[in-house]
Image (cartoon, helix red, strand yellow):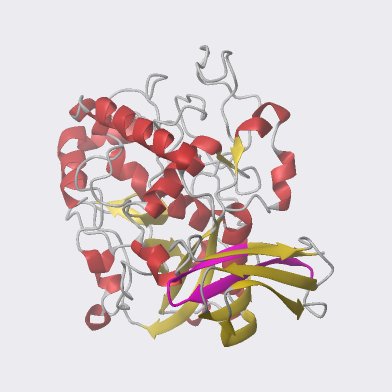
Amino acid sequence: MHHFLTLLLVLVGFSTLFSQNTQPRILCGNEVFSKIVREKYPTLQAAFDQTFEQAKQKGTAADRSPLTIKVVVHVVWNDPAENLADSVIENQIQVLNEDFNQLNTDHANLRPLFQPVAGNADIHFQLAEIVRVQTDKLFALDLLGGSILPELKHDNQGGSDAWDTGKYLNLWVCKIQPTTIFGIPIGQILGFAFPPNDLGNWPANSGAPNPDEDGVVIDYRMIGRNNPNTIENPSTGDPLMVNGRTPTHEIGHYLGLRHIWGDGGLLGPNDCNQSDGIDDTPHANAQSEFDCILSKNTCEQVEIFYNADVPDLVENFMDYSSETCMNMFTKGQVELMRNVLTGPRSGLLENTNTIAPTAQHLSWKISPNPSDGLFSLDVESESSQDLMLRIFNVEGKTMLQQAQRALFQGKQRLSFDGTSWPAGMYFLELKTPGGSSVKKLVKR
Ligand SMILES: [Zn+2]
């Protein structure tokens, strides 16, 4: 990562950098890191293709069970306004659970053309802890020095130490200062994330410079739909509409996704040959600029996947559309994220014990599902064993827990009552000495 920032500035030169767009812009940090990759690394396309072929092949056979990630949110604040209330952070966790499960209500706005390619990641987020640290530090990315806020991630430098990044998604929230080079404002970075290291569709060393700096950084004004703070688009002076989609976008990067326009060249124009490596995201030669132009078709060419020329997919979370415009991941993106989560980032799943298969010892079914709150759990066990049962909501709050209930060999039915719970989605986790798994249940 450091390497690429330095390279970027040496190669590009400032005149080129500013000739394309003289206004300070809103940026996702990952754009800066990946701009020149295509020109510099001609072998990258082959690596891309290989990675996605593997992902697609694995995807067809991949375990389709829900995958759960525990999230630690570090609120590193200087001005009290930056010390976000719990309710704002909990709202953000809810937005993530909606966006990664096709439960966002604005999903209905997706154009019919793209509805068949929309994917449900079935990835769930549990808030493990909110860590609050008051600091006197100001957090500005030093592009010339290639420094991307390591101090934010260390207690002894005015930040907050990561929890084990192999087991938790660490999400740091702070005020990201406007980005300047030699005092010239170039834009406002809203957030950035590291993909896993050595993922084939990213340049080498794109991952976190140190394991204890892995994770996602988000500006405090971009968290939650109920955030009382506002941020201006420096290009227009208008306040940005914030719906909690910056964390959705950055976690997309954290799980391996690239921008849908393929991060085309800063050395030359973006063009329609650049790809994000995903078949079902149509080519685009430029990112959206926090707008929602449904008629936009920047690449007038037949898309192989669609066998037609289709417009830009501005509703995608990996564009720079306005947060009221973006509402979907594609199936291809979902396959890649799930493969990253069950591959290089599988430590996150071991922590929530949602992937260890129990099928050989235990089968279970919830019925009726959805229901009005009276559920039955039919369990069939090949041997006698202890069972821990827990039901939690989309924010990770435990609704019901039954510890160490002894199971006998054979079939049995357990009943439970959730009639007092609010309508919505819940998760039932079964844990045995041999492993655990989670199923989704819906209360009407
Ligand atoms: Zn991005």
Residue at 58%, 34% in the rendered image: 314
Left or right of 196 in this view: 91 = right
Left or right of 80 in this view: 195 = left
Image coords of residue 101 (percent x, y): 61, 53
Is 350 contained in the magenta span?
no
Most prominent secondary structure in the magenta stretch?
strand
Residue at 76%, 61% in the rendered image: 369
* Highlighted magenta segment, given as a residue range: 423-439
Residue at 44%, 47% in the rendered image: 337
Query: In terms of depth relative to the viewer, which is nearer, 149 or 310?
Result: 310
Is 429 contained in the magenta span?
yes
Image coords of residue 90 (percent x, y): 59, 73
Image coords of residue 198 (percent x, y): 23, 46
Q: Is residue 26 visible?
A: no
Q: Is residue 230 visible?
A: yes
Left or right of 294 in this view: 60 = left
Quarter in which the C terminus is drawn: bottom right
Image coords of residue 432 (percent x, y): 49, 76
Query: In terms of depth relative to the viewer, which is nearer, 91 or 361?
Result: 361
Number of numbered tags placed on the structure image = 0
Query: In terms of depth relative to the viewer, which is nearer, 254 or 51?
Result: 51
Residue at 60%, 50% in the rendered image: 238
Left or right of 354 in this view: 215 = left
Image quarter for residue 35?
top left
Q: Is residue 273 above or below residue 116?
A: above
